[in-house]
């Protein structure tokens, strides 16, 4: 059986020797840290995808699609 430990500035603690409240908190903390790592990886993937799609748009911009912002604002104000 693996020995789980909790490290602080004061030293290394054997989780199995802690009270039930501390053991439960340790288990939740371990689950939370695992979830955070998974979400961080997911964020990295999504940011990479976002960059790739942004690059695809930038590489395919067409002068015909360019809008003069001043004319667009004036048109909106008239409507």
Image (cartoon, helix red, strand yellow):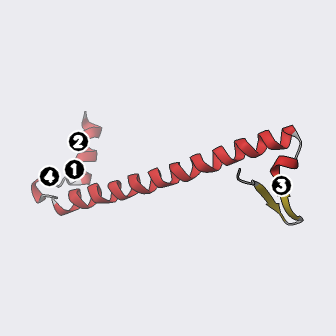
Would you call the spot at circle 3 few (<14 residues within 10 Å), some (14-19), or many (20 or more)?
A: few
Disc 4 to disc 2, how far (Cα)? 17 Å
Give whichever of 11, 53 is nearer the camera.
11
Q: Is residue 5 left or right of residue 10?
A: left
Q: Earlier in the sequence, mark 4 or mark 3?
A: 3
Q: Quick one: SS at disc 1?
A: helix
Q: CA distance from mark 1 to mark 2?
A: 6 Å
- Residue lying at 72% horizontally and 43% vertically, measured from the top left: 27
Q: Residues within 10 Å of mark 1 (few under 14, many from 20)?
A: few
Tag in front: 4 or 2? 4
Query: Which residue is under mark 1?
Result: 71
Mark 4 touching mark 1, by CB under 8 A?
no
Q: Which mark is residue 14?
A: 3
In front of the other: label 3 or label 2? 3
Q: Separation of disc 4 and disc 1 at Cα?
A: 14 Å
Disc on the earlier residue, 3 or 1: 3
Name the residue tied to disc 4: 65
Residue drawn at 23 percent across, 46 percent down: 72
Q: Which residue is mark 2?
A: 75
Q: Position of residue 1 (x, y in %)?
A: 71, 50
Count of labels in the image: 4
Q: Residue 71 at x, y = what percent?
A: 22, 50
> Going from the N terminus, do you reach mark 4 or mark 2 first?
4
Residues under labels 4 and 3: Cα distance?
65 Å
- SS label for mark 3: strand
Residue contact at pointers 3 and 1, CB within 8 angstroms:
no
Disc 2: CA contacts within 10 A as few (<14), some (14-19) or many (>=20): few
């Amino acid at each position: 059986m693996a020995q789980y430990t909790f490290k602080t500035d004061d030293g290394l603690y054997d989780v199995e020797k802690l009270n039930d409240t501390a053991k439960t908190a340790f288990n939740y903390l371990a689950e939370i840290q695992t979830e955070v790592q998974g979400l961080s990886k997911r964020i990295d993937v999504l940011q990479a995808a976002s960059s790739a799609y942004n690059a695809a748009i930038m590489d395919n911009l067409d002068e015909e699609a360019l809008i003069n912002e001043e004319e667009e604002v004036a048109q909106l104000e008239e409507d």
